[in-house]
Image (cartoon, grey):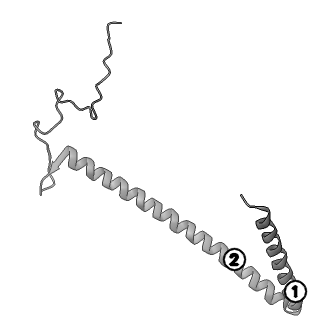
Amino acid sequence: MMTSSERKLWLIFGISFLLIVGILLIGLWPHLQLVASLVFGLILLTALVFLILHIIRTLTELGVKVHEQKLRQERLLTHERLINKRQVIMYLPSSTQHQEEQDSYSRGYAPIEHDSRR
């Protein structure tokens, strides 16, 4: 949050900026068409730069999401299956797959047992 001294500073800065712009516009009044064209060009250039930056940011985010999805698929593929050099899918042997008797709970948490007879 701004303090009162910061507000006064911004007010003084704003009034000074408007005064300078006003003096410049009055001084350049004979060249009004040139000044208007330059201001319009600057506004158009600013809008174009913001549009290009938005497009670049969107394409970058899209590329990252696609890359993450590809990595996720590769991780799933390497954890669940093995692929040999001929690109034939071979499932992992049953000794390395998860077995029902193995305790899959981590950090010492025991499973909640539900009594289905109730």
- The answer to which quarter of the image holds residue 50 is bottom right
Tag 2, which secondary structure? helix
Q: Which of marks 1 and 2 is nearer the N terminus?
A: 1
Q: What element carries label 1?
A: helix
Q: Mark 2 points at which residue?
A: 44
- The one of 108 and 63 positioned closer to us in this rendering: 108
- Percent from the top left, x then y, of residue 14? 81, 73
Q: Which amino acid does the dot numbered 1 rest on? A: Ile
Q: Position of residue 95 (x, y in %)?
A: 10, 37
Using the numbered discs, state the Cα–Cα distance from disc 1 to disc 2 in whole angstroms.
24 Å
Q: What amino acid type is highlighted by mark number 2?
A: Leu
How crowded pointer 2 is (Cα within 10 Å; few <14, some 14-19, many 20+) is rated as few
- The residue at 16%/37% (across/down) is 97
Residue at far bottom of view:
30
Q: Name the residue under label 1.
A: 23
Quadrant in which the N terminus is drawn: bottom right
| Position of residue 22 measured from the top left corner of the image (x, y, whole percent) | 87, 82
**Residue shown at the point (88%, 93%) measured from the top left:** 30
